[in-house]
Image: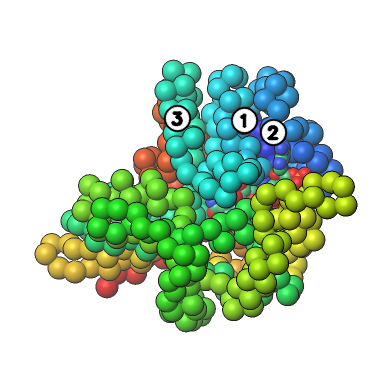
Amino acid sequence: MARILIIGAGGVSGVAVHKCAQASEVFTDICLASRTKSKCDAIAAQLKRPIRTEQVDADNVPELVTLIRDFQPDVVLNLALPYQDLHIMDACLETGVHYIDAANYEPLDEAHFEYSWQWAYQDRFKEKGIMALLGCGFDPGVTNVFTSWAVKQNYFDTIDTLDIIDANAADNGHPFATNFNPEINIREVSAPGKYYADGQFIETKPMEFSQVFDFPGGIGPKKMYLLWHEELESLVPFLKQKGLKEARFWMTFSDNYLKHLEVLENVGMTRIDPVKFQGQEIVPIQFLKALLPDPATLGPTTKGKTCIGCLIRGKKDGKDRQYYIYNICDHQECYKEVMSQAVSYTTGVPAMIGAMLIATGVWKGAGVYNMEQLDPAPFMEKLNQYGLPWVEEFK
Ligand code: NDP
């Protein structure tokens, strides 16, 4: 019996709302609020049960506080953009409601994300007796839980390397389109890479390192590139207990995607600083977002599969061990179920599960948490139950 307020009405939110609506035994009341109310109403119209919809500017804390006080949710699920994280956390603090998001805070004027801004809320959330759960999507999110699962199950005595591997082996039917918010996606992939080795984080040029990985589930060999990804920031200290030597994040990109990105970068279309155009200031990457297909509309045209998982190497009982845990998700199957492609699905389902575990008191605590700090077992069980089954392979 829980009340949930979901903020943002894009691709990921659409899936989370569908999934919360399906889980009516837990989420008895749902409110979906976003900047553009018509997008909330469009999602609400797809559901079999009524939900409340509202307009809210999530950068306006008093507006958020008024909405939270009126709806009185048990948990607020932030599926707007990383720029809104701190404002929504402020509103949760003021009203004493648990907070969850799927991406860490990023300032609007700097393509730079790290947890420090949100970890700085630790004492305030503790004092208030409420929980903030950070990065509850797939990566970050499920990848953190997969890693803590491997540790909790005692699969390793020591861990040498962690490779988080994300493939989207799909065609979305467009010459160039991103599978989640284009602005966030392009800022992420055009930034310098970074990985952890022998006690330090090492920066790379964007897309400097690549390798071919043979993916399971009929996907086959794909080229993947080393990126910096936020879950490494919390997983590296977590895995130090196991002697971690190296941690990297990899994502596949097609040659076509990279060619378009290179041209867009070269002509300045990915710039995040304002430029004067016909007497007004525009930010090129925001203009580009307006031209590109909305990821929430890619469901009908996207065909193929995602495969995201963790490849861990280390030692057990004196012998070398390799452990690969992953989920495979089919874009068209997701569309049939919730009218959305798999990138939104693989993010929206874990977000709903995190909200469910907090709302039902299975995960509880006061303060700011990353996913690996909580018991992985109930989350792993719910992944199988709610559409993201996982596979384990040992070598
Ligand atoms: P979309 O761009 O599709 O949706 C974002 C939504 O947030 C839009 O409805 C937008 O409103 C709304 N929004 C933006 N600013 C405000 C504001 N000030 N007030 C209220 N609403 C606002 O993004 P996605 O659904 O693709 O992504 C959602 C989040 O999930 C992002 O933070 C993204 O980084 C994260 N993500 C995480 C992943 C993971 O695995 N952890 C993977 C993929 C995404 P409007 O419609 O008016 O523009």
C-beta proximity under 8 Å, tags 2 and 1: yes
Q: Residue at x 48, y 81 (%)?
A: 220
Q: CA distance from mark 2 to mark 1?
A: 7 Å
Location of the C terminus by quadrant is bottom left
Residue 249 appears in which quarter of the rendering? bottom left
Element on which disc 3 rests: loop
Question: Is label 2 within 8 A of ligand 1 (CB to nearest ligand atom)?
Answer: yes
145 above or below 389? above
Tell me: is circle 1 under 8 Å from ligand 1. yes
Task: Identify the secondary structure beneath mark 1.
Answer: helix
The residue under label 2 is which amino acid type? Ala
Q: Amino acid at mark 1?
A: His
Few, some or many C-alpha atoms within 10 Å of disc 2 (few <14, some 14-19, many ≥20)?
many
If the image is split into quadrants, where does the N terminus sit?
Answer: top right
Marks 2 and 3, the one that precedes in the sequence: 2
Query: Amino acid type of disc 3?
Result: Ala
Residue under the image location 44 percent in, 79 percent down: 212
Provide the residue designation for mark 1.
87
The numbered disc on residue 58 is 2
